[in-house]
Amino acid sequence: MKPRDFLNFFKTKTGKLVVFGALFAAVLVVFSELRKRHSSSDEGIAIEPLSTNADKPQVVQSVIRPMQIFNPPPPQSPPKSQPAFQSPSATNPASVGPSPQPLPSVVPHQTELLAPISLFADSTAGAPRPKKLSATYAPFGRLIPCETVITVDSSSLQTPVVGLVTENIYYGGRLIIAAGTEVHGMAQTDRQRDRISTSISWKLVWQDGEELNLKAVALDREFDNNTNQSGWAITDGSAGLRGEIIKSDNLADIKLFAATFLSGAANALTEKQETIFGPINSPTLNNAPFQGAQVVLQTYAQQIYDSIQKNGFYVRVPSGKQFYLYVLQTIDRADASFGGAGLVEETDAQPTTSAKR
């Protein structure tokens, strides 16, 4: 084989594969030798275990500090006054023997044991007393049939709801609320569909002038036959006072359509020019009246739309409309009072006495 043929062999695919295999085998051999040397060097390093205090014996030491006993001084008696004439023995200190000095005595420190603080809740103080009902009462959830006296509109003002009780309310064989009793409440400013909602604060006024505050919800009353007012319709007992929807301005929709149409026409007649950001109005004198008309008509259309949403429709409940008052409390006839003043609750006041000397 000639040398040129040998070199040409490595230029072929087979020769290149042979060269790649030889180089790859040489790299593996070199890598294995380096790995063996690295592992042998790691084996020569001795690994010493960490020393902890668990191997050392524990030494218990006691520290004794000198304590000094507290000796309180003896109580000193006040000096007595000497008489004007004393005996010689009394005046001569030599004749009198030395007074014995009291020996110091150790008085142990006495601590007074105090009783622990105990807090007890007084179950009687501040606890509301149970209300005693009178014989003429009605429980929660009574339905009082009523009838409106004045017309009620769903306006922005606070509208009163005045009605009369149409039927006597009995419970336990006793008359609780007589027919003809007045009911007074307030209508809410918001309307829902064809209903007017009311507040839950109501007041009953009897024919003799007695008043009683009441929490109740107004419910609609619908008869199956409106001719003789008999039976119950499907909407009987639904929330709110049902009335008639009245449209304030019949031409408001036509005005809104005309203003919107003219605004769109003014926009279409305005000359435009193409830019990289899209078509814009050309700043020319011919476009000035069209742009002004477009702004004015858009503002006018928005005002008409706001007026339709606010005042375009309202609900009117005529006088003589039947409804219920669903009571949310217990009705006690004894709680009624004249002038709206509630009964003053009696309190258990303990009389106080003063000692004289």
Image (cartoon, rainbow, N blue to C red):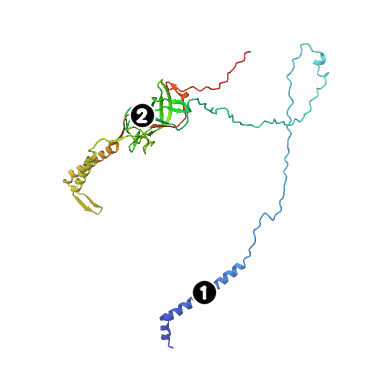
- Residue 3, image x, y percentages: 43, 86
Q: Which mark is in front, 2 or 1?
A: 2
- For the question of whether residue 199 can be seen, the reply is no
- Residue 223, image x, y percentages: 35, 35
Side of 344 relative to 181 (left or right): right
The local crowd at label 1, few if under 14, some if 14 to 19, many if 20 or more residues have their Cα within 10 Å, is few
- For the question of whether residue 210 can be seen, the reply is yes
Q: Is residue 126 above or below residue 50?
A: above
Please give the name of the residue rendered at 25% of the width and 39% of the height, measured from the top-left corner: 304
* Quarter of the image where the C terminus is located: top right
- Residue 168, image x, y percentages: 41, 27
Q: Which type of secondary structure does the marked residue at label 1 adopt?
A: helix
Q: Which of 180 and 278 is in front in this view?
A: 180
Please give the name of the residue rendered at 59% of the width and 68% of the height, measured from the top-left corner: 41
The local crowd at label 2, few if under 14, some if 14 to 19, many if 20 or more residues have their Cα within 10 Å, is many
Side of 85 relative to 183 (left or right): right
Q: Do the residues labelled 2 and 1 touch (CB within 8 Å)?
A: no
Q: In this view, does 214 lie above or below 284?
A: above
Q: Which of 253 and 71 is in front in this view?
A: 253
Give the spatial CA distance, label 2 vs label 1: 106 Å
Q: Name the residue under label 1.
A: 28
Q: Which of 235 and 67 is in front in this view?
A: 235
Q: Looking at the picture, which amino acid does disc 1 mark?
A: Leu
Examine the image and state in which quarter residue 93 appears. Answer: top right
Q: Which residue lies furthest to the left in this view?
A: 286
Q: Name the residue under label 2.
A: 147
Q: Is residue 5 above or below residue 199?
A: below
- Residue 112, image x, y percentages: 70, 30
> Which of marks 1 and 2 precedes in the sequence?
1
Q: Residue furthest top?
A: 85
Q: Looking at the picture, which amino acid does disc 2 mark?
A: Glu
